[in-house]
């Protein structure tokens, strides 16, 4: 039959989608050769669609025009071409079904046509028996209450069936209906063509008090019990809008929570939230839970809200220049800025990503968070600007299993291989504040609604960041950098089963107790270095710990913005190295099966987050060294956080030999100069064989490095005076005093080329920014411009 065709070509894939278990290599494409037939894995069981009789009536139905549900299974992994094939054949794409299948809606004629394609393994009518989840669970459910999942856009037709059946209760949501059904009504619901699954409604529900419990905020020994609620912090939320857009009718969960009147959208002049997204996000950050007796309080309900309305119709967000967006928020007192939006299907590091890094590098006390996006579950789908380096990028865990990543949550890495997302929490079916100006479905009452996605996970981490900031200010008497806040959250995060620096969960699930108030003898310490390191610099810290618990060491820095045309975005490259009491050396981000640090020959030259996790720490003193491997932009500050059994940073102590005392270079001389270059030479009394290099300075600015005793400084300005010195620098990065200075005044720039002028051999002229040398004496004519007559001119400099 047409729909049993097997793929005969080997597909070339750039990005593959796979739902293999993490133990088997999560989200990695399977081998392309010799694969077994794909199997459809459903909750009701696994089936091979070639082995059943489900397709027997398909050919007879091909003349029908009524659209119904089919499972379209491909021979191999899903690609963009696969989806385009479905769309081109008129299919509405619904859920993805493992392995390699979609649930789609189309008519039988379209199904028959699609089944003939060589990429297709099977096109099969969606069976009622595959929808029946009513017998799969009998524990922790609400009696006779079911969740009826429907194909998108079909809520009204299924609701009409329930009305005809006189269902006792039915509440319609987007994508599903919650209904009370009798045993006799269930089979009729299963036969409805637009129903995709029916299952009992569980008693357990995921909402804000669930998330705050998960991250260690609202538990009996959580951080709230220690007075850490975000008090004194201002969090800015940039999103669609906030509730009614009127202070007199504002949601009571924001009463007393505003730092200032919300900023209206410049294009509309209002801050009302007809979409409902922004109101929900803001409630998760810091809503006070007034309309739920505190049940749906936000993570940092002690903080204040600065809201920036940037919605511009529907689901669209118009943030403008993010540097101005952040700058306005900071000027008004915000130190944390959370953004549950991004550019879908834009995974490259683009101009907006670069601007985020530009602002956060220049404002290192300003913490920015972004949602990773909902483009899962293919690899490398973290959206811009959530793929920026300095953000805290957040992924979404499932409600039913908070140790499992949600299928829609965007996976790492960034396109250049950087670890993203950074952290995860549950963002699935989160109940939070509902905008009265929106049409969002109320749940459980008119004041709240339920939404899912990385948008819902991110504000919970933003609230966590506010609590971390309060902790450092109130408990440690320091104003933390954003790098320290990020390092603290990462250091305390829990691995939920994917391993450290995984594509799915990054550095793990947020745990504020671990980060701020560890128990059972664990304790943490930190360094917030504001001076920074330059190339060749290093600094070391002595860390004492006791055996019995893992030792976790986290290094984070806010990096200089990357160039959008570059293929690698790390600019200022620091290296983390940890020497154990027995002399073993671990480098940052070198893990055995993503579970524990191992020895590596190479440093990480990709990420601006590096970790060493010693799973079985020994009692004694560890030396933690941070090295400036390559820092081309300014100096690079950093944050270091350690935690372990009685772990403590006991001081700086580089485990290095005494530096060599170097003599200053002598006899610095100008050997040649042009209108924009100066050539220098000098002598060195330190001798050879010591790996010495030389740094050349104009006044206090370094203008070059040389491995020999001469150097030509380029890119200078004609007719300007420059003063140069030179320093000798050892392999350890220690510099000599500067040499005596030498001064050079540059001549004027070469005369521009002109017509009807007699030029002699070796005359130099400038033309359109380049310098040309006359190679044949002549009198120039109009149209004999140097680039046009190579027989007369040779370009010597651009």
Image: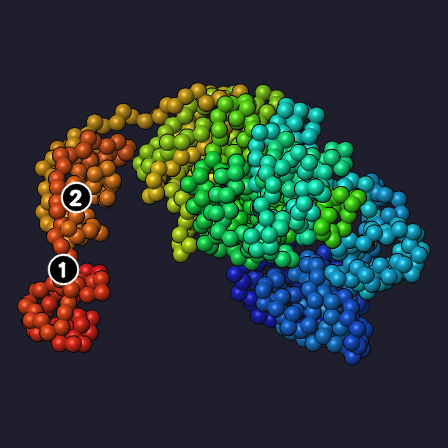
Q: Which dot marks residue 750? A: 1
Q: In the image, 631: left or right of 503?
A: left
Q: In the image, 224: left or right of 750?
A: right
- The image position of residue 409, as x and y in percent, is 62, 50
User: Residue sitting at 88 percent across and 61 percent down?
Assistant: 161
Q: Which of these two is toward me, 658 or 39?
A: 658
Classify 10 Å Cα crowding around label 1: few (below 14), some (14-19), many (20 and above): some
Q: In the image, 615: left or right of 36?
A: left
User: Residue sitting at 70 percent across and 38 percent down?
Assistant: 253
Image position of 155 with respect to 432: above or below: below
Location of residue 31 by image quarter: bottom right
Count of picture labels: 2
Image position of 371 with respect to 597: above or below: below
Residue at which label 2 appears: 722
The CA span between labels 2 and 1 is: 19 Å
Image position of 448 with respect to 754: above or below: above
Q: Is residue 211 visible?
A: no
Classify 10 Å Cα crowding around label 2: few (below 14), some (14-19), many (20 and above): some
Colour setup of the view: rainbow
Quadrant containing the C terminus is: bottom left
User: Residue sitting at 70 percent across and 67 percent down?
Assistant: 92
Q: Which of these two is toward me, 427 or 173?
A: 173
Location of residue 432 by image quarter: top right
Q: Disc 2 on helix, strand or loop?
A: strand
Q: Which of these two is toward me, 191 or 151?
A: 151
- The image position of residue 515, as x and y in percent, is 57, 29
| N-term-proximal mark, 2 vs 1 | 2
Q: Disc 1 on helix, strand or loop?
A: loop
């Amino acid at each position: 039959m047409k729909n049993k065709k097997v793929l005969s070509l080997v597909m070339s894939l750039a990005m593959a989608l796979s739902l293999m278990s993490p133990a088997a290599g999560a989200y990695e494409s399977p081998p392309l050769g010799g694969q077994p037939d794909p199997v459809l894995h459903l909750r009701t069981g696994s089936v091979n669609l070639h082995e059943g009789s489900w397709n027997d009536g398909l050919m007879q139905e091909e003349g029908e025009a009524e659209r119904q549900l089919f499972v379209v299974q491909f021979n191999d992994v899903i690609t963009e071409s696969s989806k385009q094939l479905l769309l081109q054949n008129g299919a509405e794409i619904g859920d993805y079904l493992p392995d390699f299948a979609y649930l789609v809606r189309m008519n039988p004629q379209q199904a028959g046509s699609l089944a003939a394609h060589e990429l297709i393994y099977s096109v099969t009518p969606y069976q009622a028996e595959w929808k029946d989840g009513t017998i799969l669970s009998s524990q922790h459910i609400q009696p006779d209450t079911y969740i009826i999942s429907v194909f998108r856009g079909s809520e009204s037709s299924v609701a009409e069936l329930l009305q005809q059946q006189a269902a006792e209760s039915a509440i319609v949501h987007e994508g599903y209906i919650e209904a009370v059904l009798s045993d006799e009504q269930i089979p009729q619901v299963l036969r409805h063509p637009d129903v995709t699954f029916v299952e009992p409604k569980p008693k357990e529900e995921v909402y804000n008090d669930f998330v705050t419990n998960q991250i260690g905020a609202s538990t009996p020994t959580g951080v709230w019990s220690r007075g850490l609620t975000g008090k004194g912090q201002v969090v800015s939320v940039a999103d669609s809008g906030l509730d009614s857009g009127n202070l007199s009718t504002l949601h009571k969960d924001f009463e007393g929570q505003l730092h200032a009147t919300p900023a209206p959208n410049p294009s509309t002049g209002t801050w009302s939230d007809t979409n409902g997204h922004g109101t929900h996000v803001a409630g998760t950050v810091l809503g006070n839970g007034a309309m739920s007796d505190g049940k749906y309080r936000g993570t940092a309900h002690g903080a204040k809200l600065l809201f920036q309305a940037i919605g511009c119709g529907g689901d669209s967000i118009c943030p403008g220049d993010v540097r101005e967006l952040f700058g306005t928020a900071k000027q008004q007192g915000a130190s944390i800025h959370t953004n549950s939006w991004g550019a879908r299907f834009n995974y490259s590091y683009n101009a907006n990503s670069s601007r985020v890094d530009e602002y956060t590098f220049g404002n290192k006390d300003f913490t920015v968070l972004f949602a990773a996006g909902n483009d899962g579950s293919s690899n490398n789908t973290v959206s811009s600007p959530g793929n920026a380096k300095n953000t805290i990028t957040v992924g979404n865990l499932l409600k039913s299993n908070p140790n499992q990543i949600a299928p829609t949550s965007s996976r790492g890495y960034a396109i250049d291989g950087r670890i993203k997302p950074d952290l995860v929490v549950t963002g699935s079916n989160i109940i939070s504040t509902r905008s009265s100006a929106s049409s969002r479905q109320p749940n459980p009452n008119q004041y709240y609604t339920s939404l899912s996605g990385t948008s819902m996970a991110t504000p919970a981490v933003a609230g966590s960041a506010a609590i971390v900031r309060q902790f450092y200010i109130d408990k440690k008497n320091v104003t933390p950098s954003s790098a320290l806040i990020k390092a603290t959250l990462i250091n305390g995060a829990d691995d939920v089963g994917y391993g450290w620096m995984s594509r799915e969960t990054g550095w793990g699930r947020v745990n504020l107790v671990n980060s701020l108030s560890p128990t059972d003898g664990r304790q943490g310490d930190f360094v917030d270095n504001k001076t920074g390191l330059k190339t060749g610099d290093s600094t070391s810290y002595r860390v004492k710990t006791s055996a019995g618990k893992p030792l976790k060491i986290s290094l984070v820095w806010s990096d200089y913005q990357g160039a959008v045309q570059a293929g690698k975005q790390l600019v200022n490259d620091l290296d983390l190295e940890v020497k154990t009491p027995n002399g073993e050396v671990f480098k940052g981000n070198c893990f055995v099966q993503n579970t524990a640090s191992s020895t590596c020959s190479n440093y990480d030259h990709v990420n601006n987050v590096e970790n060493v996790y010693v799973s079985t720490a020994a009692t004694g003193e560890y030396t933690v060294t941070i090295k400036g491997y390559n820092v081309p932009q300014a100096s690079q500050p950093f944050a270091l956080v350690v935690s372990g059994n009685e772990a403590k940073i006991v001081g700086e102590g580089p485990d290095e030999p005494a530096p060599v005392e170097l003599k200053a270079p002598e006899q610095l001389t100008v050997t040649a100069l042009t209108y924009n270059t100066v050539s220098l030479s000098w002598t060195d009394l330190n001798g050879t064989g010591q790996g010495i290099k030389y740094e050349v300075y104009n006044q206090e600015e370094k203008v070059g490095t040389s491995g020999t005793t001469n150097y030509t400084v380029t890119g200078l300005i004609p007719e300007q005076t420059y003063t140069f010195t030179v320093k000798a620098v050892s392999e350890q990065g220690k510099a000599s005093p500067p040499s005596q200075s030498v001064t050079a005044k540059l001549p004027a720039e070469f005369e521009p080329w002109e017509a009807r002028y007699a030029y002699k051999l070796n005359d130099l002229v400038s033309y359109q920014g380049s310098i040309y040398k006359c190679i044949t004496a002549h009198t120039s004519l109009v149209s004999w411009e140097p680039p046009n007559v190579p027989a007369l001119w040779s370009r010597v400099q651009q």
